[in-house]
Image: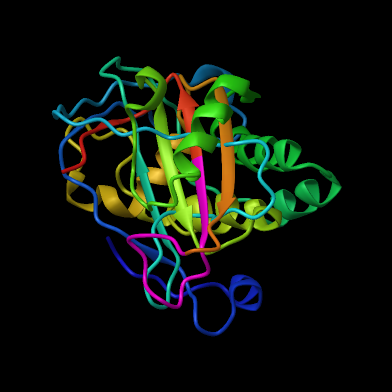
């Protein structure tokens, strides 16, 4: 995956030694996405299927409790890593819009007082930009996310509790920074990479690792989410030595893009 410079706001949170990073995903995917929303015509625009098939699946889960947990996907020596994947081969139409709302997300999230509320607000403010309905919290997805995060092994795991969910993971940010994980790493850090792909019958999947998290957040067919962030005092496996040992897992149902990780 690409390595991106961390935003100044995140740099203050993570520290000078840990900036975010993204890990590569495989190229195979079962993918559908719609045309971008035109202002004033959101009600008239539906997802137009664009399909590219593949053989892998990845999960995404978000968990509710845990005080110190890692946010965003994998972390390496300096940047925080983010990874996105989804499971289940069911195709779901998705309508995406090209705009981003970092300020409105931050303002709304500031009013949220619990981890669960911040997860929902941070997801839904961005989904609204793409005419996608609000996600609701799912305790089962959150519980599964917590189990995965508690392993302190930074990697996708889409088999726990039977699988069948989509998954975004991150490392390096504590639970109280879940808003930054979702808004800055998963959404704002990737939305621009999807430009030029709206409405394409054969989108270029070679750049999927740059926008996979974004697509799961705004996937029209996804309706629920559960996340967890785990602090790993003995260390988080698969990340660099300078990455704070916080592991965040968000699981989604139904999953968006079906992507098999090697």
Where's residue 203, x and y in %?
21, 39
- In the image, 239 versus 48, the foreground residue is 239
Task: Note whether 260 is above or below 151 in the view shown.
Answer: above
Task: Note whether 42 is above or below 196 in the view shown.
Answer: above
Residue 17 appears left or right of 198: right
Task: Note whether 237 is above or below 32 in the view shown.
Answer: below
Q: Quadrant of the N terminus?
A: bottom left
Residue 146 appears left or right of 47: right
- In the image, 36 versus 218, the foreground residue is 218
Q: Residue at x 32, y 61 (%)?
A: 238
Q: Is residue 37 visible?
A: no
Task: Note whether 253 is above or below 208 in the view shown.
Answer: above
Where's residue 254, x and y in %?
44, 19
Range covered by the magenta-colored residues? 235-249
- Write down the quadrant of residue 58 in the picture: top left
Where's residue 21, x and y in %?
39, 66
Q: Residue at x 59, y 73 (%)?
A: 14
- Write down the quadrant of residue 88 in the picture: top left
Q: Farthest residue to the top: give it.
A: 90
Where's residue 174, x and y in %?
63, 59
Q: Is residue 105 visible?
A: yes
Q: Residue at x 64, y 51 (%)?
A: 178
Q: Quadrant of the C terminus?
A: top left
Magenta highlight on residue 239: yes
Q: Residue at x 62, y 57 (%)?
A: 180
> How is the model colour-coded?
rainbow
Residue 163 appears left or right of 103: left
- In the image, 221 versus 42, the foreground residue is 221
Magenta highlight on residue 16: no
């Amino acid at each position: 995956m690409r390595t991106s410079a961390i935003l100044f706001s995140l740099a203050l949170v993570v520290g000078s030694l840990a900036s975010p990073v993204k890990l590569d995903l495989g190229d195979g995917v079962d993918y559908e996405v719609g045309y971008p929303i035109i202002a004033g015509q959101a009600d008239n625009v539906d997802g137009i299927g664009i399909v590219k098939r593949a053989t892998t699946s990845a999960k995404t889960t978000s968990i509710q409790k845990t005080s110190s947990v890692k946010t965003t996907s994998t972390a390496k020596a300096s940047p925080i890593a983010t990874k996105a994947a989804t499971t289940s081969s069911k195709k779901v139409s998705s309508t995406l819009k090209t705009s981003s709302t970092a300020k409105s997300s931050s303002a709304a999230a500031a009013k949220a007082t619990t981890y669960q509320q911040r997860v929902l607000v941070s997801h839904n403010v961005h989904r609204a930009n793409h005419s996608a309905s609000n996600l609701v919290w799912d305790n089962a997805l959150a519980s599964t996310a917590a189990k995965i995060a508690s392993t302190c092994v930074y990697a996708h795991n889409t088999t726990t509790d039977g699988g069948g969910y989509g998954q975004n993971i991150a490392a390096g940010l504590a639970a109280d920074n879940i808003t930054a994980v979702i808004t800055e790493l998963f959404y704002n850090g990737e939305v621009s990479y999807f430009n030029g792909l709206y409405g394409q019958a054969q989108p270029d999947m070679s750049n999927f690792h740059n926008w996979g998290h974004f697509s799961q957040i705004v996937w029209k067919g996804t309706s629920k989410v559960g996340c967890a962030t785990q602090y790993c005092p003995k260390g988080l496996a698969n990340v660099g030595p300078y990455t704070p040992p916080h592991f965040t897992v968000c699981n989604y149902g139904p999953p968006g893009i079906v992507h098999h990780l090697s």
